[in-house]
Amino acid sequence: MDRDEKIGMQEEGRDRNIVGWEDDEDPENPYNWTRTRKWNHVAIVALINFVTPLASSMFTPGVTQVQKEFGNYNHELSSFVVSVYPVEYEMGGSKLMRIVACGPLVLSPLSEIYGRLYIYHGSNIAFVCFTIGCAFAPSFESLIVFRFLAGCAGATGQTVGGGTIGDLFVQIERGLPMSLYTLGPVIGPAIGPVGGGFLAQAMGWRCGFPEIVTFLTMRETFAPALLSRKTALLIHQTGNPHLRSKLHRNMSHTDFLKLSMIRPIKLLFLSPIVTILSLFMGITYGYLYLLFTTFPVVFEGGYRFTTGTIGLAYIGTGVGCSLGTVITGWSTDRIMVHLSKNGERKPEYRLPMMIPGAVAIPIGLFWYGWSSEKGVQFMMPIIGTVWFGMGLMMIFMPITMYLVDFYSMNPPSQTVFKDIKAQADVVPGIYAASALAAATVSRAVVGAILPLAGESMYNALGLGWGNSLLAFIALAFCPVPILLFKYGERIRKRTKLNL
């Protein structure tokens, strides 16, 4: 291979110092990887995204034993032991009571500087270490700290994973991989208590949870990082110090990190679309953790479940989440293709599945609340959580796919390419991680606060009216997907942000 071939400047023939992909078929471009290789990475990201939130709720059935062992029966503090994990899983941070230090605000820009792979490996190792720390915590306070740090380390899958999917798949192909990726943060907490209850009964609450670190098969997917490494290799091989990546940023890593940490905040507070969707996602996700922290009160107190069998109360949510994932994953790309026949592939075409999802949430809350209030056979409230779980995924997945679709290209494009390979030179995932980080911040705040208020709310209003209050709030959001589907494009085009 001669020098010109090494530099690979077919698309930039006038400037031989610009390094890009060799051509539209370049196998080093993640868009051109084999399907086996792509799906291997999807499986890894989905597994990471499943394991880390699984640990957040597996602990729930063992809370009673923790109270007995450490002699601390304060309900709010015990609830905080559960909710402090999702605070950090969603947000991260360096001080326990200061949410401003948000993990995703650091992790997402770091992944856009050094690539996704280093962030995955470092966070996975830290997660294992802090989870082991939870198992051997000598005091209630140290348990809270280790749970906090484990949640921080576990935030990577949710923060960076969407960007990885955007790195590998063009818009029309993202439905199924995104469905698997988004299933983890919801199905993990739903399944965790099922095993956690029996482990807590048989082995005590100190049950460690292993993290599978996939050093052998996972590779870098972020195009700017890949081209940066290619450029460095070519400089070494050719001795030409003037070579630069086609995707090179004309700023230092420090400046880029500062800019990238501000970007999710800009999106959250200055982009009406991101603000609305983040709030919607935050409330529904907060409901999930509120239900999880109050299930022991309902099923142990009202239905006399044991420490081992209480985990079975969470199966309904898991079944509902699975159904929602299958329905949304099967339909979302088909809806996109159908609605794109006019020549435009808009991110808003991801939103129609939110309409039935927004209705299923209040149905599930009303069903669960009043059936448990009246003491109807325990399967009835569990069936109500099936509706809730299904609606949760039908909201969670379209919002995530919308953000990845819109912010995976800069500037975002709604053009339908005649050939998938024609998209291969677009910068994939450039802002997807930042957009997901913005949504994560909102979700974390609500997910941390609601569980702390759960028992007080039920004590004041009862199970029926307490869950009805949540359902009425959910009903107020039902028009959101309809309005955004109709007016979202207009709002996006009027929103000018310097990102």
Image: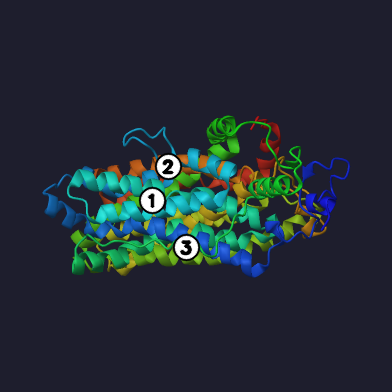
Give the residue at x 84% y 55%: 2
Say left or right for 238 vs 49: right
Closer to the camera, 353 or 115? 115
Residue 338 location, x and y as percent? 73, 60
Determine the CA span between mark 1 and mark 3. Answer: 16 Å
Pointer 1 residue: 126
Label placed on residue 197? none
Local SS, label 3:
helix
Q: How crowded is the residue under tag 2: few (<14 C-alpha within 10 Å), some, or many (20+)?
A: many
- Counting residues from the start of the chain, the first of labels 2 and 3 encountered is 3
Residue 167 location, x and y as percent? 64, 53
- Counting residues from the start of the chain, the first of labels 2 and 1 encountered is 2
Label placed on residue 91? 2
Residue 264 location, x and y as percent? 54, 36
Local SS, label 1:
helix
Residue 190 location, x and y as percent? 38, 61
Label placed on residue 47? 3
> Which is more foreground, mark 1 or mark 3?
1
Which quarter of the image is occupied by the N terminus?
Answer: bottom right
Task: Answer yes or no: is residue 384 visible.
Answer: no
Above/below status of 15 relative to 121: above
Give the residue at x 55% y 61%: 218
Could you tell me the amino acid type at mark 2? Met
Which quarter of the image is occupied by the C terminus?
Answer: top right
Could you tell me the amino acid type at mark 1? Ala
Determine the CA span between mark 2 and mark 1. Answer: 16 Å
> Which is more foreground, mark 2 or mark 1?
1
Task: Answer yes or no: is residue 38 visible.
Answer: yes
